[in-house]
Amino acid sequence: MSDNAPGSNVVVGIDGSKAALDATAWAVDEAIARDLPLRLVCVVGLGPEAGLSPNEIELDVQYAESVLRQAGAIIEETGKDVKVDTAILRGAPADVLLTESRGAELLCVGSSGIGAVARRLVGSTATTVAEEAACPVAIIRHCEPTSTRANRWIAVAVKASTDDEQVVLAAMREARLRHLPILAIGLWQNDFGFTPYDELDRLMQSWRQRFPDVHVHPVTTRSDLVKFLVEEDEPVAMVVVGTDEAARVAQLVGPHSHPILGHPQCSVLVVRS
């Protein structure tokens, strides 16, 4: 999924939230597909240098051990064979996860939605790693059972240039892995190149040949990606974007008051290309 050298694991940021547990469950298939271990990382903050007492430090560690056990139980419930490593690390969550991304093939974090306090809370982790990580980043809103995912899409913006080939490739691989169809959105704007429907369909024919088991439905729009998702009511499970869209992850994931909540469980995969 990246032009970078493949990483040695699939990393999940664990903080005890349901969103992080959903990210854990989602990441199991990613690790298996890559034949890599799943690395669960819990960040407990700074230690004595932050003025914490030995008792407070011990409580931090106990909490981290507890949430890692919860994540481990989620993995066991899947019944899937995946190697799991765990780590309790100290530091600012975003900084630790960015460091982890240097040795990872994929970094997964959970998000329950980005609201008015996003830059202080979620924004300090999910949005920061989406913009700055050294590997692809998956921000998971919800991990649904396979039986309830019917008729949901993997959405990807397709532009006239070949610069975004890695983004489309990642979307096709994700669709195959999740047994979901692709909604290929041709962005018809001067900023993104001229992609009328016939050109979009031609571009997608080569991808259909490479992934004959993935259903691809092309659509074109004169809107940008976020506006299209806001205006359309197609059920989208995940949006796959490139680094040029990483700064807009907050919009894609959606604040609680944002109309994109028509896709309340829409996850985002940011691809390094």
Image (cartoon, rainbow, N blue to C red):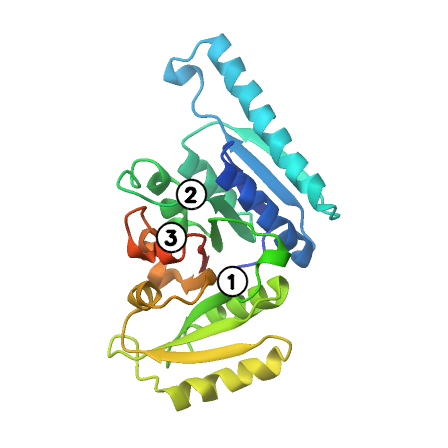
Residue at image x 66%, y 57%? 34
Residue at image x 30%, y 76%? 192
- In the rendered image, the residue lying farthest to the left is 190
Residue 2 tag number = 1
Residue 253 tag number = 3
Disc 1 crowd, CA 10 A, few/some/many (<14, 14-19, 20+): some
Q: Give me the C-alpha separation between circle 3 and circle 1.
A: 22 Å
Q: Nearer the viewer, residue 141 or 64?
A: 141
Q: Nearer the viewer, residue 77 or 231?
A: 231
Label 3 amino acid? Val
Query: Looking at the rendering, in which quadrant would you find the C terminus?
Result: bottom left
The picture places residue 204, in percent across and down from the top left corner, at 49, 82
Among numbered discs 2 and 1, the one appearing first in the sequence: 1
Label 1 amino acid? Ser
Disc 2 crowd, CA 10 A, few/some/many (<14, 14-19, 20+): many
Residue at image x 59%, y 49%? 27
Are the residues flagged by discs 3 and 1 in contact, CB closer than 8 Å?
no
Among numbered discs 3 and 1, the one appearing first in the sequence: 1
Q: Which residue is mark 2?
A: 112
Q: Give me the C-alpha separation between circle 2 and circle 1.
A: 26 Å
The picture places residue 15, in percent across and down from the top left corner, at 49, 33
Residue at image x 44%, y 56%? 266
Q: Nearer the viewer, residue 189 or 89?
A: 189
Label 2 amino acid? Ser
